[in-house]
Amino acid sequence: MPKITYVENDGTRHEVEVPTGNTVMEGARENNIPGIDADCGGACSCSTCHVYVDSAWIDRLPSPEGMEIDLLDFTIAPDERLSRLSCQIKVTDDMDGLVVVVPEEQAN
Ligand code: FES
């Protein structure tokens, strides 16, 4: 099962296993990662699942598509290169080791 590391803005790291086929957002919620509220439940309509993907990983993920790109414009403090909606990243086996950072503005 791929391991994903979620990094809180204070540097606290949470390395958890996320089943293939789940989303990065689901992995966060199932492991109570602070700051990923995912209010819309993964419907790509709230942006409270915003994360910054580690720069070493961003080009290894499938590119964002229409609705995600539109919604990223409405996140607080978007990063043009690293921002993603974690509900739109479906975990695959080759994402073992993925690192994402929770934006400071989402800290609970
Ligand atoms: S959970 Fe709402 S946009 Fe991702």
Image (cartoon, helix red, strand yellow):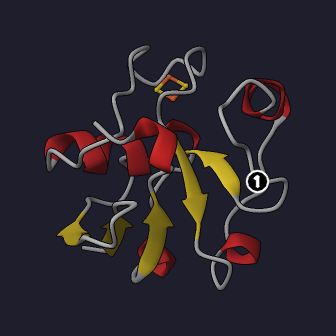
Secondary structure at numbered mark 1: loop
Q: Is residue 23 visible?
A: no
In the figure, 39 relative to 81: above or below? above
Q: Residue at x 82, y 61 (%)?
A: 81
Q: Residue at x 73, y 44 (%)?
A: 78
Q: Residue at x 45, y 74 (%)?
A: 99
In the figure, 87 relative to 14: above or below? above
Which sits in the foreground, 39 or 107? 107
- Quadrant of the image occupied by residue 2: bottom left
Which sits in the foreground, 105 or 48? 105
Say left or right for 78 vs 9. Answer: right
Q: Position of residue 98 (x, y in %)?
A: 46, 76
In the picture of the structure, the residue carrying the numbered disc 1 is 79
- Quadrant of the image occupied by residue 82: bottom right
Q: Position of residue 35 (x, y in %)?
A: 33, 40
Say left or right for 68 vs 91. Answer: right
Check the picture and name the quadrant holding the C terminus.
top left
In the figure, 70 relative to 6: above or below? above
- Quadrant of the image occupied by residue 72: top right
Q: Position of residue 6 (x, y in %)?
A: 34, 64
Amino acid identity at mark 1:
Asp
Q: Residue at x 45, y 59 (%)?
A: 91
Say left or right for 61 vs 101. Answer: right
